[in-house]
Each structure stands twice: as structure tokens, then as C-alpha cells.
Image (cartoon, rainbow, N blue to C red):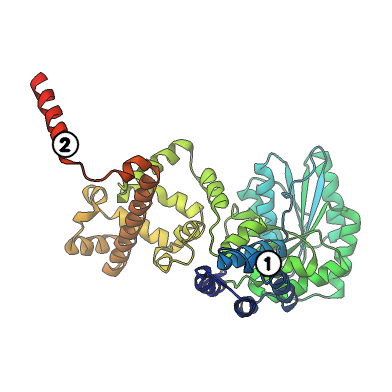
Amino acid sequence: MFESLQDRLNGLFRKISGQSRMSEENIKEALREVRLAMLEADVSYRATKTFIKQVEDRAVGQEVLKSLTPGQQVIKIVHEELVELMGGEQPPPDLPDGSRQVIMLMGLQGSGKTTTAAKLAKFYKDKGRRPLLVAADVYRPAAIDQLQILGGQVDVPVFSLGADADPVDIATQAIAHADTEVLDVVILDTAGRLHIDETMMTELEKVREIADPYWRLFVADSMTGQDATQQAEEFNSKIGIDGVILTKLDGDTRGGAAISIRAVTGCPILFAGMGEKLDNLEVFHPDRMASRILGMGDVLTLIEKAESAYTEEEAKKLEKKIRTAEFNFNDFLGQIQQIRNMGGVKAILAMVPGMSGNAGLKNLDLGEQEINKCETIVFSMTKNERLHPSIISGARRKRIASGSGTTVQDVNQLCSRFDQMKKMMKKMSKGQAGAQESPTKKRRGKPTSSNKKSKKKRKFVTFGRN
């Protein structure tokens, strides 16, 4: 996500960050580039205009012109204003304790409401709540069956009265059922349409009046860009929304909806769908998202993902491997499931500061199909080949390809990725060792002749004592 916007902004920031002096004209020229990059990313014109005006008001003032590092100061201002544009500091999406709460999901067909309902149920179940999924979409074929399957996958009950029931009756009886069974989070998966119409809005108004939801959440497909912003405006004006959930942010999206939907609607983005799996739902943090967009990484989210994917013992073992750069195909096979759960290599490295603009990330990207292929290739290796990847010659690669049902090119690509990963780990371990080295040790030069003699003398004395 945001790749084209990141590339444009990173190129601009590299150009201005090293400048020792900047004038009003230089700053305005740089902001014209930022404006163009945002419009190309499908950010709404209104949000872009407001954002550029606020940045310009701060950037052309004494804060930048008298700064020792004016280029870096401009980048800092852009980051702060981008955070503010997407919502600033906002509280986490926690529900009140001790009472039953209703969450009403709204949106058009294809936005991902049903899958998002199951993701929300899992999210709150992991927090100790007792959710109930309600199948109130009686129009889309197989919507009820889909929700029941997803509910089974996250072990959450699903309330349904069938496709012939009235959505208002479904909501009424579902809430009564939740109170009887002491279920404290009711998630309504309401019906959508291919486009906004009066029939849908009237039905949603009736459901809202009956359910009295704590949250009315609009589910927006981020792939639709400015269309998602316009849809949110329509729902907000007619039904009223308390927050937004952006789906498909892991896809090839330009990011316009994520940046502008808060500024246009005034409603906060609470969650972001970052994949198809039911645990790929992240709390939306404007500051972290701004850092991702500007290529500054997202260390906090990376830590949270690692903590959920690894036990403490596994984390210590992985840390040792990274420090020693001793990483073989057995380790690769053992970690591949965790990498899959964390969104793939590219998603992980993109959250490391300074890595999002690295062209080598494209070669390291591992999607679901690629991960399955990698597993098959590694399973076709001998025990010795897994332990010592350097012995894998051309003949061995041909045999591995034949055994795994892949091509020699596939095996070569895997080995190339593996080598890149090892080099990256070696580089990381060297950097860490350098940071831990004492200043005294770094300043120490070559030993003098007297030092050499004293060292030899100590060795001789020690030898004599032995």
C-alpha cells in the first residue's frame, strides 16, 4: 500500500533533507510536489488543499527558515500535519465494560462487511468479551452461510432467522437472545447494495432505532479511493456514523481513502483490514500510518505483531540467530509460519525504519502461494542441504526442482531470497555489535612497541607458569 506515494515523497525528502538553507520559494516548490503526490494517490482535493495550507503556514515561518536543519524540519512538519489530517491522537476502540453493547456495520456490497464482522468478533473475543454475530443481510446470496462459516472459524455464535425474515425483527430478537445468553457484544452485519438507495437507507434507519448501537461503523473499501470518502459522507448524512473501518489496505491501493476520509467526514478511522485472514485486523493509529506513508517504518506495530506471533522462547532463539547470522533452511522452515501470520517478509521489513523504500523488498516479498512453494522446495532438500545451504550446487538444485515439482528457476529464486535474508541479518548484527562497542575501544589505535613487548612478556610468563 502507498507505494507510489512513498516513492514520490521519499524522493522529494531525500532532495530537501540535506539542504542547509531553504527559502520560501524552495518550500513552496517542495509543497507543490507533495500536493501532486497526494492527488495522484487519490486523496480528496479538499483534504489535500487543507493539508498543504496548514503545512505551508508552518513551514514558511521562522520555525523552518531559522532552523539549523530546515529540510528535516519541513519533513517533521509534514509528518505532524499528516497525523493530524488522519485523526491525531485518538483513544483506542474499547467498549464500556459491564454492559451489553451493539455494533452496527454498514456499507455497500463488496466492501467486506461480513468478513469484517467476523474479524471484529475475534478482536473483542481475544480481549475477553463474549460477542454474538448477527446475520441481518437477507438479500445477498449466501451472506448468512458465509457469516456462519466465519463464526465457526473464530468460535463465536451466529444468530440468524433465515433469508425470509425482516432485518428489523432479526435485530430485535438477536439483542434479546444476547441478553438471555449473557453475550455482551452484538455485531450486526447489515445488508448493503451495489449503490446507495432510499430503500437501503430506510431499512438501516429502522435497524438503528431498534438496536440503539453504541457504534455505527461504516466499512469502506480502500481500493475505491475517493469513492469510499463520498460513500462515507452519504451514510454519515443520512444514518450517522461513529467511525470507519478501512478494508483491503494491504492491497495495491494508493491510500487516498485512509488519508482523506477522516478530514472529509470528521469520523475517526477505528480499524484497518490488512489481509484476508480473520486476525488481520489492526487498530488504526494515525501516527503509525503517517510514519508508514512517509517511509519511516512502524516499529510499534511490528513489536505487537511479533509478540502475538512468537513465544518468549521462540523470540530468544530468533534473536540469537540474528545476532550470529547463523540462519539455515531448517530455521527458514520453522519461521515461515510466523512470517505468514505477520503478513509476509515485505510487510515486516516495510515496518522497519528506512526499509520501506528499499528496492530489494520486492525480491523478498512472500505471498501465500510463494510461501507454499518455498515450503515444498525446502521439504525436497536433504538434511545436510538444509543445514548447509552453501553446498547446494547446480546439480542439487536440478534434483530439488524435480522433487518439488518446481523449476530450477524457482529453486534459484528461493536461494537468492535466502542469501539476501542472511546478508540483511548479518548487516543487522554488525550494526548492533557496533552500537554496543565502548567508545574507549573504538578510539583505541594500533598498539605501540612498548605495548607489544608487554603483551609478549605476559604471554611468556603465563606459559612459564603453566
Q: Earlier in the sequence, mark 2 or mark 1?
A: 1
Classify residue 444 by image quadrant.
Answer: top left
* Residue drawn at the location 30% of the way across and 46% of the way down: 326
Q: Amino acid at mark 1?
A: Gln
- Where is mark 1, residue-wise? 62
Q: What element does badge 2 sit on?
A: helix
The vertical placement of 53 against 425, above or below, is below
Q: Is residue 6 left or right of residue 265?
A: left
Q: CA distance from mark 2 to mark 1?
A: 57 Å
Q: Is residue 1 left or right of residue 163?
A: left
For residue 450, which numbered disc appears in the image? 2
Measured from the top left, where is residue 397 in percent x and y?
23, 62
* Residue drawn at the location 42% of the way across and 69% of the way down: 359
Q: Amino acid at mark 2?
A: Ser
State the quadrant of the N terminus. bottom right
* Residue drawn at the location 55% of the way across and 55% of the way down: 298
* Residue drawn at the location 87% of the way across and 53% of the way down: 211
State the quadrant of the C terminus. top left
Classify residue 433 by image quadrant.
Answer: top left
Graded by Cα atoms within 10 Å as few (under 14), some (14 to 19) or many (20 or more), the crowding at tag 2 reads few
For residue 27, which numbered disc appears in the image? none
The vertical placement of 297 against 448, above or below, is below
Q: Is residue 292 left or right of residue 199?
A: left
Q: Is residue 111 visible?
A: no
Q: Nearer the viewer, residue 409 or 72?
A: 72
Q: Nearer the viewer, residue 94 or 278?
A: 94
Graded by Cα atoms within 10 Å as few (under 14), some (14 to 19) or many (20 or more), the crowding at tag 1 reads few
Q: Is residue 423 visible?
A: yes
Q: What element does badge 1 sit on?
A: helix
Q: Is residue 234 left or right of residue 131?
A: right
